[in-house]
Image (cartoon, rainbow, N blue to C red):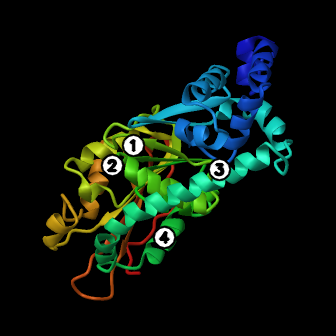
């Protein structure tokens, strides 16, 4: 079997496997790999945990990246590292067989917990400054638990496959959906918000979620690379929501889906100044039109209407790749 045929079958050619094992067969690099099974980490995190210099850690990471064991991505001035899925078949049995209860791995894990505690405290400090504004907005629409239940209902029992949450913010949608996904990714333009999301997801035990910094209008991912794309409470902050939906639709795999959650049209002008909203909601037809322009068919819409007058209606749009030739069962536009 040729090298190309091995890769197509999900196996690794012998020379490459030998290179992978050689890269892992060094104390610091094996400790790094063990730590990355707990989730992505920065160079700074690893220097704090392992007590080694930044140049030394960077050299080890470079070798692991070159061997395909680790993936690197940038988040502003920071670089984060995570285990590569491409080598999981070879690396996972090795790493799962390690005894984590004895040094040095037990000590590494204790220092990792300390780093995560510091990260969570910093994220909480940042979020505490935003909380009053977010509490004000939450009070204007149906409870978030109602929205989340409607999201799960809209998606149904169909496997989620690969998932991306665009404009992930605090990671709330990832916390809801990532446990059901084979692969989960969150994108946000703010490093500070990603720090909050990272801390929240770690608290839920969701350490293998991939968080990336980037522009929602031009997400840095390959075309058709996700089975489910989520745009939750993001469009009203954007100057060009139609462009953002075109970028989101580009990521939808054949037969995949895009879920949009946002506000119906309203007249609460104070949200422009107090909450930095650029748009005061969207009609069902407007978003469906944008989705159609992006090549997706809206197969379900639903309104979550608050019980009190003067509050905001939350609308869900579920769209699907038009090349599938079939439609999902429609949801009624309903009062929840």
Dot 3 and dot 4 residues touching (CB under 8 Å): no
State how far apart marks 3 and 1 are (Cα).
Answer: 38 Å
Neighbor class of circle 3 (other Cα within 10 Å; few <14, some 14-19, many 20+) is many
Quadrant housing residue 179: bottom right
Quadrant housing residue 143: bottom left
State how far apart marks 3 and 4 are (Cα).
Answer: 32 Å
Picture coordinates of residue 286, whole percent (x, y) = 24, 57
- The residue that mark 2 highlights is 291
State how far apart marks 2 and 1 are (Cα).
Answer: 8 Å
Dot 2 and dot 1 residues touching (CB under 8 Å): yes
> Residue at image x 79%, y 30%?
90
- The residue that mark 3 highlights is 112
Picture coordinates of residue 239, whole percent (x, y) = 19, 49
Element type where label 1 sits in the image: helix
State how far apart marks 1 and 4 are (Cα).
Answer: 22 Å
Above-or-below relation of 116 to 43:
below
For the residues carrying marks 4 and 2, which lies nearer the camera in this image? 4
Of callouts 1 and 4, the N-terminal one? 4
Say whether residue 76 is left or right of residue 92: left
């Amino acid at each position: 079997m040729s090298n190309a045929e091995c890769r197509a079958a999900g196996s690794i050619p012998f020379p490459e496997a030998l290179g992978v094992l050689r890269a892992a067969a060094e104390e610091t690099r094996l400790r790094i790999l063990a730590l990355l099974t707990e989730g992505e980490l920065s160079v700074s995190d690893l220097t704090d945990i392992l007590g080694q210099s930044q140049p030394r850690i960077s050299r080890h990471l470079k070798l692991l990246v070159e061997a395909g064991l680790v993936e690197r991505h940038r988040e502003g001035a920071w670089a984060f590292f995570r285990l590569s899925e491409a080598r999981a078949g070879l690396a996972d049995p090795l790493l799962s067989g390690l005894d984590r209860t004895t040094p040095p791995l037990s000590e590494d894990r204790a220092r990792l917990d300390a780093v995560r505690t510091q990260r969570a405290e910093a994220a909480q400090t940042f979020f505490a400054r935003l909380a009053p504004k977010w509490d004000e907005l939450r009070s204007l629409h149906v409870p978030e638990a109602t929205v989340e239940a409607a999201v799960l209902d809209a998606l149904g029992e169909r496997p989620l496959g690969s998932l991306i949450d665009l404009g992930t913010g605090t990671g709330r949608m990832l916390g809801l959906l990532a446990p059901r996904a084979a692969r989960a990714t969150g994108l946000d333009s703010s490093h500070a918000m990603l720090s909050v999301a990272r801390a929240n997801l770690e608290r839920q035990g969701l350490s293998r979620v991939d968080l990336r910094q980037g522009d929602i209008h031009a997400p840095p991912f390959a075309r058709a690379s996700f089975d489910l794309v989520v745009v939750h409470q993001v469009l009203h902050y954007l100057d060009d929501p139609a462009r953002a939906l075109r970028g989101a639709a580009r990521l939808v795999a054949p037969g995949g889906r895009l879920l949009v959650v946002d506000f119906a049209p309203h007249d609460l002008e104070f949200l422009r100044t107090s909450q930095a909203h650029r748009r005061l909601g969207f009609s069902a037809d407007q978003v469906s039109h944008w989705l159609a322009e992006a090549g997706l068919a809206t197969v379900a819409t639903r309104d979550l209407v608050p019980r009190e007058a003067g509050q905001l209606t939350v609308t869900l749009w579920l769209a699907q790749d038009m090349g599938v030739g079939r439609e999902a069962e429609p949801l009624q536009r309903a009062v929840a």
